[in-house]
Every structure is written in C-alpha cells, then in structure tokens.
Image (spheres, rainbow, N blue to C red):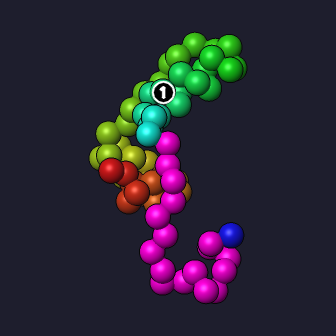
Amino acid sequence: MLGNTPDAFNQIWNLPTDQQRIAGEDWINLFVSEMGAKNKYTILPNWMVRGIGIFMPVMQEIAEMNY
C-alpha cells in the first residue's frame, strides 16, 4: 500500500519487524522440512556467480545484489 500511494513518496516509514530474525540456513531448513527433502545446498562464491553471469544475465544481476 505504501509503495502505491503517491503521498508516501520520499517519506521515511518505520515498520514493525519481528525480533526473531530468520537466517538463510534457517529458511532452507524450514522449506526442507515442509517438502520432506534432504538439506543439501551449496553456496557459490561471488566470482563464480559473476562468471555464470556471462552466460545467464539474471545471475549477473544477482552478483550485484550479493552482500
């Protein structure tokens, strides 16, 4: 709603957030438990994501957003 309201543009909005933050690995564990699958994942280094971005433009965008 805030993103589509012209009056909200260029304003600072403090929204309530949950104190129990979920890390990336916790998200994976939640999905794995719901899907009944094995917890198997790989973390790609940023240089590899950039390399894949040569062939897949969406990966190039992901490399820019990597923190």
Tell me which residue sits at (40%, 57%) in the image: 65
Q: Does 37 lie within the magenta span?
A: no
- Position of the N terminus, as image quadrant, is bottom right
Left or right of residue 6, residue 11 in this image: left
Tell me which residue sits at (49%, 70%) in the image: 13
How far across and how far down the image is residue 15, in percent? Answer: 51, 59
- Mark 1 residue crowding within 10 angstroms, few (<14) / some (14–19) / many (20+): few
With respect to residue 66, does 19 lie above or below? above
Tell me which residue sits at (43%, 48%) in the image: 52
Out of 47 and 36, give the one closest to the viewer. Answer: 36
Query: Can residue 54 be seen by looking at this rendering?
Result: no
Out of 12 and 25, give the one closest to the viewer. Answer: 12
Query: Can residue 20 be seen by looking at this rendering?
Result: yes
As helix, strand or loop, the secondary structure at mark 1 comes to: helix
The residue type indicated by label 1 comes to: Asp
Quarter where residue 25 is shown: top left
With respect to residue 11, does 19 lie above or below? above
Total number of numbered discs in the rendering:
1
How far across and how far down the image is residue 23, in percent? Answer: 43, 34
Quarter where residue 9 is shown: bottom right
Q: What secondary structure characterizes most of the magenta part?
A: loop
How far across and how far down the image is residue 63, in percent? Answer: 39, 54
Q: Does 16 lie within the magenta span?
A: yes
Q: Which residues are magenta?
A: 2-18
Query: Badge 1 is on which residue?
Result: 26
How far across and how far down the image is residue 61, in percent? Answer: 46, 60
